Image: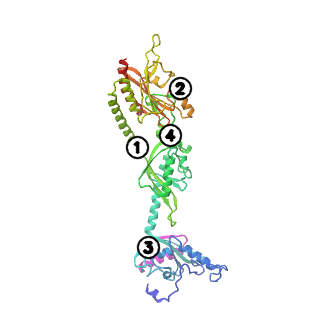
Amino acid sequence: MSASQRSEPARPARSARSSRGVPGQPGAAPSASGHPDCPDGPERPDSELLAALLDGMDAALCAFDADGTVTHWNHEAERILGWTAAEAVGRKGLGGWAARPGDARDVEARLTEAMGTTGRRVHEFALLTKDGGRVLVRTQSSGVPGADGRPAGVYCAFSEVHAQVDLERSIALSEALLDDASWNVVLVDADLRVAVVNANAAGALRTARKAAPGRPLGDFLDQGVEEAEAALQHVLAEGAPPAPTELWVTLRDADADVADGLEGAEGVRYELLDDDEAVRGEGGDRGETGAAARRRCWRGGFLRLASPLTEEPAPLGAAWIFQDVTEVKGQEQESARMRFRGNQLHRAARAAAECEDPMEAASVHLDFALAGFADHALIDLVLDPPPGAPADRIRLVRAAATPTGAPGPCPPVVPGGIPLAYPEGHPALQAVERCGSVRASARRSDESGTAQWAAARKWPEGAVHGLCAVLRSRGRTLGAVTFLRTSSRRAFDRTDATYAEDVAARVAASVDLAVRGR
């Protein structure tokens, strides 16, 4: 305490709870009669309410009258500096106790400046704690006018600079994540509705940033939305998972307001090929480009957002921060698939070498090829035309087939020599005519249409995707091998066609031996 303060008579300490102030001063609470010094009943609850409001503030607050005497000092100011309200209220200025004398002159000058101007003034200066330490604080000061409009005091709200910097850093981080981050950021509320998305996430969800808030994830995701919502519910209830999470999702069609802005494969709609549109080679990928664009793998983490203003943090929602790793995962899966298929071909060759019957060896190749590849397999051989029949008409006869019911091995069919009633343009006939692979898929319009599609092609019930590869050996076309998938599998792609051709080459060698041995 300075010498001038020691020479002054001691003033009674007034806390934020007990100080009533004077007219025009901060904290003056008028009574029901309008006079601040009238001790009637309604004045006490008003002053207690004011004290409760000041003490409940998150920011430290002190107030001064026109003479620079401290009139208010709340709990947060006591926490930061250590001086209690009883020790602070009634002191003149901050010099000698809450600020060093050299710093006090600058502090008082800034407070005086704020008292005579309108608006708030933001400053940073050092204050003293009760134990003698220094604390750098950031203050917001504003003058308090009296009843006559003349300056009657000033209030000063302050907080530790590092706390303010932490707050500003958190805000800056949030803005950077939502504006400049290369990651996709999606914030959802406690009801699992989208609250905020950044630009990259809006592109990933195929929507616009302004159109996303308030909508459920089901508006953007088709398959995988249940897994995403389950993960978010777990985060809200239990907290963030310890490791990154990978989710496979299928996107819905883009919103109308951003559909025109999508380029390349992202804007292509997926449509399965009809049998009349069955093509060989590159043309079969037309209907699969859109599916690859909508099927995405997102790897990222989750964060629970909780309010710091409650004793037990209440969840405000969750943040989902992810990156699109579809291309990387696709390459990993393709490598694993190639290794598995290569191993199957090797095992099939060793097993077929132990078969005495060449047709049994052909069926062994199909049995190994079916694992993880297809649900059914058929072998159709070219039947020599009868005498006098046109030689350009292709007739096929069934040589081997997997069971139509439960899955099982592909045994040879008892030879009967009756040609198959394949309609004109059948994929197997096209494969034989073109000496290449043909893919065909049914449109997913309804189940009855799919069943009729399979029945019309003499294929097992439930087949919706077909891949026919030609059997060629010693420069001759021997027939075709057909692989079929049900609706639980995806359509055949170009890589599948390459694998089917590898299997067909091995099957053709065995079939050629069987044909020569007859």
Mark 4 packing: few (<14 Cα in 10 Å), some, or many (20+)? some
Q: Closer to the N terminus: mark 3 or mark 4?
A: 3
Name the residue carrying label 3.
Answer: 125
Name the residue carrying label 4.
Answer: 267
User: In this view of the protein, can residue 284 be seen by the observer?
Assistant: yes
**SS at mark 3?**
strand
The kind of residue on which mark 2 rests is Ala
Residue under the point 48% across and 79% down: 84
Q: Residue furthest top?
A: 388
Q: Nearer the viewer, mark 1 or mark 3?
A: 1
Which numbered marker is on residue 29? Answer: none
Residue under the point 52% across and 70% down: 120
The kind of residue on which mark 1 rests is Lys
User: Is 315 within the magenta?
Assistant: no
**SS at mark 2?**
helix
Mark 2 packing: few (<14 Cα in 10 Å), some, or many (20+)? few
Name the residue carrying label 2.
Answer: 456
Using residue 327 as the reference point, say whether residue 15 is left or right of it: right
The kind of residue on which mark 3 rests is Phe
Real-space Cα separation, disc 1 to disc 4, in angstroms: 22 Å
The kind of residue on which mark 4 rests is Gly
Using residue 277 as the reference point, say whether residue 506 is left or right of it: left
Q: Report if the CB atoms under discs 3 and 2 are less than 8 Å apart.
A: no
Real-space Cα separation, disc 3 to disc 2, in angstroms: 87 Å
Name the residue carrying label 1.
Answer: 329
> Which stretch is magenta?
101-123
